[in-house]
Amino acid sequence: MVNVEKIDSANSIIKAHIENQELEAKKDKVARKIAKDANVPGFRKGKLPAKALERKVKAVKKLYAADIEREAINELLREILDEGIKALGVEEVLGEPEVVKFDKNENGIDVEIKVYTKPEINIGEEYKECVPEVELPEVTEEEINKELEAIAKENATTKVSDKQVAQKGDIAVIDFKGYIDGKEMENGSAEAYPLELGSGSFVPGFEEQIEGMKVGESKRIKVKFPENYVKELAGKEAEFDVTLQEIQEKVPAEINDELAKKYLGDENANVEKLKEYIKTSIQNRKKAEVFAPKKEEILECLVKKYEIDVPEGIVEKEIDVMVNNEAAKLTPAEIKELQENPEKLEEFRNKFKDEAKERVKLTFIIDEIAKKENINVSDEELSQVLFYEALMQGQNPQELIKYYQENNLLPVLKMNLVEEKLLNKLLEEKAKK
């Protein structure tokens, strides 16, 4: 007999009593399946005569008693769980059901299984009260032109300069050969190497000593490699024989339709289209800065405005994530102390309980509001975000997607994107009003 008890709209307990005869019948069924599937010399698989099968069943029961009982109990628990979920009338359970009572006695086994479901939540229009006043940022013509000039510099070409003395910002074309303790350095020399002075791409102090050199001049430069440099060179003093071959200067690209086509990767682009693109980019950056604190305000308001039940199992999972993140900052000694002291570990976990509850609560609230606002995130959008992230990290996009899939991180990423889109929409609508 299975009974269900709702603690609240998100947490329920399924209760059942397994009679001894139920367990024995299930054990017999498991044993018979094993016996039927066993290979017995002289007989085809699954074709044992009745008497031979009974002898095999008895042998299996005796030989694998513990395994058979464990499998029988697992099957009975699955049946209880299925029946309980059906009685609750829910479409799905969240997270893993938890066996909170398993009392084996002379009358059978008393079982209680805790299950977690999506909480009841009623969302009207009141969430809009949480959206603060906000102004959409303006973009000036001066800002657009400044960025346009920066793009022209990024796409600059180089030419030989008439300058005879190297200065910061110039490209010094140099021959150099390095020495440590009087011995030539491995991979420490080059010819006609273009070095932008002030870029900080060489050892500290190197570029500064080239400033002021004249074309054709040779000079010995002394530097010291930083302590955090590659192991073989860290902290060592070195000398370089340097000759300045020529000075080059950057010539910004001409601001025209050709630059627009190259930068936007669009054969139909022109300067006006590039300006529109720049304007949108600046506006999005400004909006991100203005909206960021406003988003925090909205989230804090939503948590206070709605009272909902939260699935305890999901809260515990969130606490696990927060504990693991915090544990990464602890010393090995501190971690060992927590592992060896259950009371301290419980105290450590409890520090995150309230925040974990708020996070879980907010997830359900955001999900419900997003449905009202018709906000969703497609698989294509998810792929684009992961592709961009992989690009930024220098990773293979397919490997990153696989990592997210294997670690069940796609739902988390999707929820984050839904939240971002929702908050942006609410703030933009408020600004237009």
Image (spheres, rainbow, N blue to C red):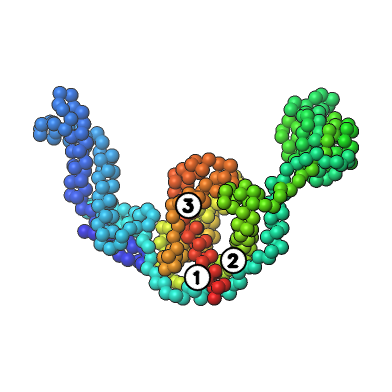
Q: Tell me residue 112's x, y (percent).
A: 31, 57
Residue 88 figure quarter: bottom left
Residue type at mark 3? Leu
Q: Residues within 10 Å of mark 3 (few under 14, many from 20)?
A: some
Q: Secondary structure at mark 3?
A: helix
Say if residue 379 shows up in the picture: yes
Q: Residues within 10 Å of mark 2 (few under 14, many from 20)?
A: many
Left or right, residue 112 beside residue 32: right
Q: Nearer the viewer, residue 307 or 161?
A: 161
Per the image, the residue denoted by label 3 is 382
Per the image, the residue denoted by label 2 is 291
Q: Secondary structure at mark 1?
A: helix
As measured in the structure, the alpha-carbon distance from the residue carrying label 2 to the one carrying label 3 is 22 Å
The residue depicted at 65 percent of the width and 49 percent of the height is 259
Q: Secondary structure at mark 2?
A: helix
Left or right, residue 391 beside residue 64: right
Tell me which label, 3 or 1, sits earlier in the chain: 1
Q: Tell me residue 130's x, y (percent).
A: 52, 73
Q: Above or below — where is 188 with respect to 127? A: above
Q: Tell me residue 374's x, y (percent).
A: 42, 65
Residue type at mark 1? Leu
Per the image, the residue denoted by label 1 is 302
The residue depicted at 44 percent of the width and 60 percent of the height is 376
* C-beta proximity under 8 Å, tags 2 and 1: no
Tell me which label, 2 or 3, sits earlier in the chain: 2
Q: Nearer the viewer, residue 54 or 137?
A: 137
Residue type at mark 2? Phe
